Amino acid sequence: MPDLKWTRSQKNVVLAAYLGWTLDAFDFFLMVFLFTDVANEFHVDVKTATTAVFLTLAARPIGAFIFGRLADRYGRKPVFMWNILSFSVLELLSGFAPSITAFLIIRFIFGIAMGGEWGIGSALTFETIPAQGRGLVSGILQAGYPSGYFLASLAYHFFYEPLGWRWMFVVGAVPAVLVLFIWRGVEESPAYLENSIKTKQHGLGEVLLQNSKLAVYAILLMACFNFFSHGSQDAYPNLFLKKEHHFDTKTLSNMTEIANVGAILGGLFFGWLSEKIGRRRAIMMAALLSLPVIPFWAFGSTPVILAAGAFFMQVCVQGAWGIIPVHLNELSPPEIRATFPGVVYQLGNLVASSNLTIQVTIAEAYGDNYGLAMALVVGTVGVLIALMVAWGPERRGVAMADAHRQPNTAV
């Protein structure tokens, strides 16, 4: 971390937010390993089973709005705790679903709970830490996403064969223990305490109307970003590696783990870099570097080439994503900071929630060629992200609370 004086609570809030997003992603990505098992258990086709991912992603804006508004009104810390407890319980219930209908309903409600975590956790963090540390911390927070994917691949590797698919969701209830750490080790956001009266005086509609162009831009940008991440990840283990390339459980788990190591390193590096060269430049660099990696990642002829391609693809994808937590929080109107980043992120997710269905449709049209489907999606949105960011706003270093106010270096 940068050479700053960090309080115990500041260190704890970074750890709590990182673990919250890690365990949230862990719960979500367990599902992408289990499409065929769910389909076989409930006697439906794989496309029907993938509807669970669509419903989870589609429900996340609802959760971002509900939990975000609660956090803007009642505080980041208590709502953060209830949010984590909610998605942990719903993950547990997924393992006991008696039918495909019940399973899909539970995954939809799980999506509501999942949708609240990112916005609240990032707001609590960036309103608490010193401004000069935001870039690297942004990378650390976003590294929670591939960290969760990595943990899911480890859980699949070690527990799937001896326990079966239902017990994988029972394992996914572990995040509930994080609530105790937050309760004892994390303090409320100083910016929330400072701005809480102002927050209650301004209605959501009034603030959004004043920032309508920013909101539309952020939603469209996050739609591209979610196609970027889900387009490179959702079909990768179970459909691309297992169905198309016929790799066994341990091989596809190892390759997924390698990809997520790249994702973690990419998020940390580009998050740190954004503090040096700016948020937009770092995002553009990461997005455009993904393009020459596509042939190795999607069309490699050997496991070694495919694994190397997956590693460098996730360096780029999650490298660009590593800047998003701080970028959206800096752009956000302060009165609705727990709501705005999470809602625009999850509305973008809603637009991109059809990604897996689109990729399956493309792949089936070309003889189950999932590599082609992934390449088309990722290549297209990589270019769109670079173009949108090049013409978009940036407010690197904007103050969030008087407690650590510094000159505004807005671009």
Image (cartoon, rainbow, N blue to C red):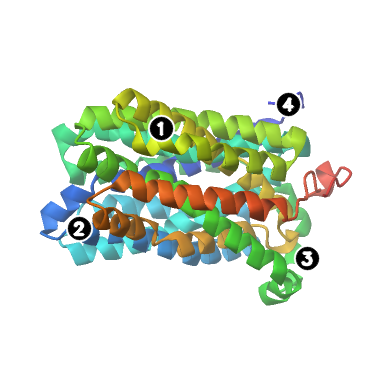
SS under mark 1: helix
Circle 1 packing at 10 Å, graded few (<14), some (14-19), many (20+), is some
3D distance between C-alphas at marks 1 and 4: 35 Å
In the depicted view, which residue is nearer to us: 242 or 188? 242
Mark closest to the chain's N terminus, 1 or 3: 3
Q: Where is residue 380 in the image (x, y as percent from the top left)?
A: 50, 52
* Amino acid type for the residue under numbered disc 2: Ala
* Amino acid type for the residue under numbered disc 3: Lys
Q: Position of residue 206 (x, y in %)?
A: 73, 76
Circle 4 packing at 10 Å, graded few (<14), some (14-19), many (20+), is few
SS under mark 4: loop
Mark closest to the chain's N terminus, 4 or 3: 4
Mark closest to the chain's N terminus, 3 or 2: 2
Mark closest to the chain's N terminus, 1 or 4: 4
Q: Mark 2 points at which residue?
A: 97
Q: Name the residue under label 3.
A: 198
Q: Name the residue under label 4.
A: 2
3D distance between C-alphas at marks 1 and 2: 39 Å
3D distance between C-alphas at marks 4 and 2: 47 Å
Q: Mark 1 points at which residue?
A: 296
**Badges 1 and 4: C-beta atoms under 8 Å apart?**
no
> In front: mark 4 or mark 2?
4
Residue 336, image quadrant: bottom right
Q: In this view, does 53 lie above or below 205?
A: above
Residue in the picture at 61% in, 53% down: 76
Residue in the picture at 19% in, 44% down: 165
